[in-house]
Image (cartoon, rainbow, N blue to C red):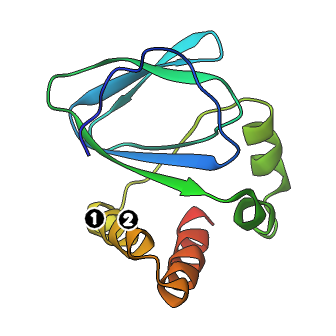
Amino acid sequence: MTVHKMAGPHMHSQIELNFVLSGAMTYWFDGRELTVDEGRLCLFWGMIPHQVIDRREGTQFICLYVPMSVFLGLANLNRFRDAVFRGAMIEALEIRSYDRDIFARWRQELLAGDPDLMEIVRNELTARVL
């Protein structure tokens, strides 16, 4: 997907994951400006007001929304969850060689609407976050 500037901040109940495929995007995120560069993966709680305020021309990303029930069900991640709920934007320390392909596949499978595929994506996503 192409990244576009947003007219204003918004909120939603899901956990948002953004994987920047090319370019860079800058968020206004609860009063701070944070830039996510090409090849980076970030995660945050959508209830924290956020807005894309800038991006390099042609920036592409994959955006996935994780239902709160899935996020709350992740085992042994209390400190991680607490940080997200306190307003942290978490950036992955390690990007794996297959992340670009797997995020694209997850997006396609979620858009297909098949409940079995959605369950597989939830399980794979949980394993990736852990």
Report the residue that reaches farthest toward the bottom. Answer: 116
Residue at 65% of width from left, 17% of height from top? 30
- What amino acid is found at the position of numbered circle 1 in the picture? Ser
Camera-nearest residue between 17 and 83: 17
Residue at 58% of width from left, 11% of height from top? 32
Q: Splitting the image into 4 quarters, where does residue 115 fall?
A: bottom right
Residue 130, how many percent across, how many down? Answer: 63, 66
Mark pair 2, 1: CA separation: 17 Å
Name the residue beneath numbered marker 2. 107
- What amino acid is found at the position of numbered circle 2 in the picture? Arg
Residue at 64% of width from left, 38% of height from top? 46
What is the crowding at mark 1: few (fewer than 14 residues within 10 Å), some, or many (at least 20)? Answer: few
Depicted 122 relative to depicted 35: above or below: below
Residue 119, how many percent across, how many down? Answer: 58, 83
Camera-nearest residue between 13 and 54: 13
Name the residue beneath numbered marker 1. 97
Depicted 91 relative to depicted 86: above or below: below
Q: Can you tell which of label 2 and label 1 is closer to the viewer?
A: 2
Determine whether, in the image, residue 120 is placed left or right of residue 88.
left
